[in-house]
Amino acid sequence: MLLTLLAIIGLLIIVYFLFVNFYPSFGGDVSKALKSDYSKSDNYKEGKFVNKKDVPKDLGFSKTVSLAYTFFTTKVPKGRPENDLKVQKIDSAAVSDYTQDTRLIWFGHSAFLLQMEGKNILIDPMFGDVAAPHPWLGGSRFNKEMPIDIEKLPNIDAVIISHDHYDHLDYESINKLKGKVNHYFVPLGVGVHLLAWGIPQEKITELDWWEEVQFDTLQFACTPAQHFSGRKFGGAQSTLWSSWVITSEKERIFFSGDSGYDDHFTAIGEKYGPFDFAMLECGQYNELWADIHMMPEETAQAGLDLKAKAIMPIHWGGFKLALHSWTDPIERVTKKAEALGLPLVTPVIGEPIVLDQLPKPNSAWWSQL
């Protein structure tokens, strides 16, 4: 019996090793030379990237396994919509020929197409069905259709990535996009995944927190977030996570990526605000990991800290990655935003968000489902 158990464990280890090393979606690994380069960053300590505060806490193996078991076995009322979410389709010509006011198209969760100053910019373009390294390892997204298929997108001037988790950086999406994309802007270390997937080095710019880069008439600033990274065991905190500030001469946009609530929102607001529009994480939270994912009430407060004229809750309406109902994030942040007098933007997936028309769109479409 003991020999059989050891044989099974050994086989599982071999299968995992082969899976991780030969299945492409896991991405690349940070080399010793890169680790040496990253050691110059204030955010890199003892071979790993770190937050300003000592978070997230290491739960340990047993608690991690227990948490995973709870997640996969707990039946959450309204954990998913009863039916696939309907999206507003957008014609490929209407995208490629667009030259008017700055607008965004939401693809659900945290993925956006930003059309600004004549540029097409994709933000965390996760268009895949499952936020996991393999389709068998996760639940499917809430919207089967996209507002527009990857194949029908026009040339993409830039892709901006916040961090390397599967619900933000998707191998299949990057692979389908790479013939269309001129350049990628990522936090330190994330470029190793793009390189592993065939993106040329000269198309990748890595930035540390508070670093800025000029992109024609736009400026991209890599700004802090309180989160973590990693795509496989042994790769935790090997790459940096961030939020992003996108500015033109007349407009300022903030994208939070994933983040727990802390005073970095105030610091960003003081340096780059006020913002015309802020896309703020609001979903996949739990008290057990409140240090790396905001509660909805904190999302609204972060909007005030940033001096945002209007905010949009993101990181919801795409995947079930926590134990709350799928509408809990939007219901709670709506209530808090109203109490704070903060305009809330709530588009249907695919509905254009035009900065000059904010806070529209703002219908409570989820309440009808």
Image (tube, rainbow, N blue to C red):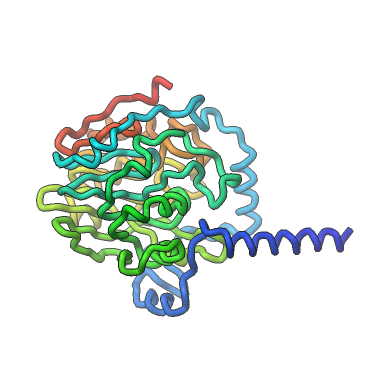
249 to the left or right of 195: left
The quadrant in which the N terminus is found is bottom right
- Using the rendered image of the protein, determine whether residue 50 is visible from the camera's viewpoint: no
- Using the rendered image of the protein, determine whether residue 74 is visible from the camera's viewpoint: yes
Tell me the residue at 37%/51% (across/down): 177
Q: Position of residue 34 (x, y in %)?
A: 41, 75
* Front residue of 227 and 151: 151
- Figure quadrant of residue 16: bottom right
Q: Position of residue 280 (x, y in %)?
A: 32, 44
Q: Position of residue 130 (x, y in %)?
A: 51, 44
260 to the left or right of 100: right
109 in relation to 257, above or below: above
Tell me the residue at 43%/76% (across/down): 35
In this view, which residue lies farthest toward the left? Answer: 249
Q: Count all numbered tags in the image, as a single digit.
A: 0
229 in relation to 323, above or below: below
Q: Position of residue 126 (x, y in %)?
A: 41, 47
- Figure quadrant of residue 300: top left
Tell me the residue at 25%/45% (across/down): 114
* Front residue of 289 and 38: 38
